[in-house]
Amino acid sequence: MKKLIASIFFLALVSLGANAQCRAFTKNRVLPNLTGFIQNENYNAALFMEGDEAELLMTFYGGKDYRLVVMAHPVLPEVEFEVLDTNDELLYTNKTAANKNVFDFRMSSTQQLKVRVRVPDSKGTMVRQGCVTIVAGHKQS
């Protein structure tokens, strides 16, 4: 029983440390990319391992200019992301973009978009883990 309680306590500490690490990464490395934009209230960050993929549904309002920033901690390979509408039509991919971390766009009408993030597997002998953050901001009207 003591080992179980100690294990749970250790896992909680590791989780808190990882969350603090993601917050620091977001504050220091990601948020400066939103200069000139007002960050929305959502903080979307998680620990990813190589080969992980996730999808996030976000609401964007019509008539606004947006900046979407998706960044991974430098320990991970370059993160790939796509923006799709709710019918899974591809609107943007960073695979062919000059700036791999930032997508600027204007919404003509309010809608939800899917942001699909993928951390490529580097096929190395050690699987790396790091923070991936997705933030959005809009320009003041």
Image: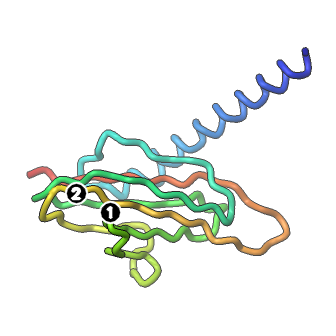
Q: In this view, does 37 lie above or below 127?
A: above
Q: Is residue 86 above or below residue 11?
A: below
In which quadrant will I find the N terminus?
top right
The tag on residue 111 is 2
Relative horizontal placement of residue 42, taking residue 95 as reference (left or right) = left
> Within 10 angstroms of label 1, few (less than 14), some, or many (20 or more) residues?
few
Residue closest to the eye, 54 or 106: 54
Residue 89 is situated, as x and y percent measured from the top left of the image, at 34, 74
Q: How far apart are marks 1 and 2 (CA)?
A: 9 Å
Residue 13 is situated, as x and y percent measured from the top left of the image, at 71, 28
- Determine the secondary structure under disc 1: loop
- Taking the spot 63% from the left edge, 61% from the top edge, the residue there is 52
The extreme top residue here reads 2
- Taking the spot 41% from the left edge, 61% from the top edge, the residue there is 115
User: What amino acid is labelled 1 in the image?
Assistant: Thr
> Within 10 angstroms of label 2, few (less than 14), some, or many (20 or more) residues?
few
Residue 9 is situated, as x and y percent measured from the top left of the image, at 77, 22
Color encoding of the figure: rainbow
Which of the 4 image quarters holds residue 8? top right
Query: In this figure, which residue is indicated by the disc labeled 1?
Result: 86
- Determine the secondary structure under disc 2: strand
Mark 1 and 2 residues: CB-CB less than 8 Å, in contact?
A: yes
Residue 86 is situated, as x and y percent measured from the top left of the image, at 32, 63
